[in-house]
Image: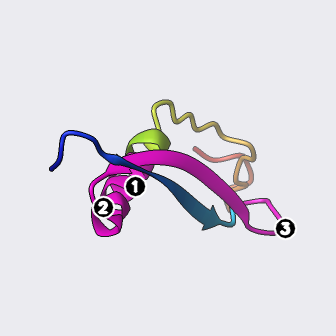
Amino acid sequence: MTEKLRKYEATVRLKMPGNAKETDYTFPVAADTPSEAMVLAVDEWKRITDPRDIRVKEIERVMTAEGGFGS
């Protein structure tokens, strides 16, 4: 690597659940070459999109054959 890195702009295009169309997400990357920038962009995307707080809750109970709401 050289002392001064080139600046690249990485763009990730994807369709999020619930959206009708794709959205572009853009962020800067500093690297020596475009191929290195691509690798760093993938690593950065994984870092910034890593789920930090996932919560799950029951929204509908299942009716069992025994005549009541089951576990």
Callout 3: 10 Å neighbours few (<14), some, many (20+)?
few
The residue labelled by disc 1 is 41
Foreground mark, 2 or 3, reads: 2
Confirm whether the magenta stretch covers residue 42: yes
The residue labelled by disc 3 is 20
- C-alpha distance separating marks 3 and 1: 25 Å
Please state the extent of the stretch shown in magenta in the rendering. 17-46
- Say which residue appears at 75% left-offset and 47% top-offset: 60
Confirm whether the magenta stretch covers residue 23: yes
Answer left or right for 7 relative to 57. left
- C-alpha distance separating marks 1 and 2: 5 Å
- Label 1 secondary element: helix
User: Looking at the image, which residue sits at the far top?
Assistant: 53
- Say which residue appears at 63% left-offset and 36% top-offset: 57
Q: Tell me if label 1 and label 2 are in contact, CB under 8 Å.
A: yes
- Say which residue appears at 57% left-offset and 44% top-offset: 71
- Label 3 is placed on what type of residue? Ala
The residue labelled by disc 2 is 39
Foreground mark, 3 or 1, reads: 1
5 relative to 24, above or below: above
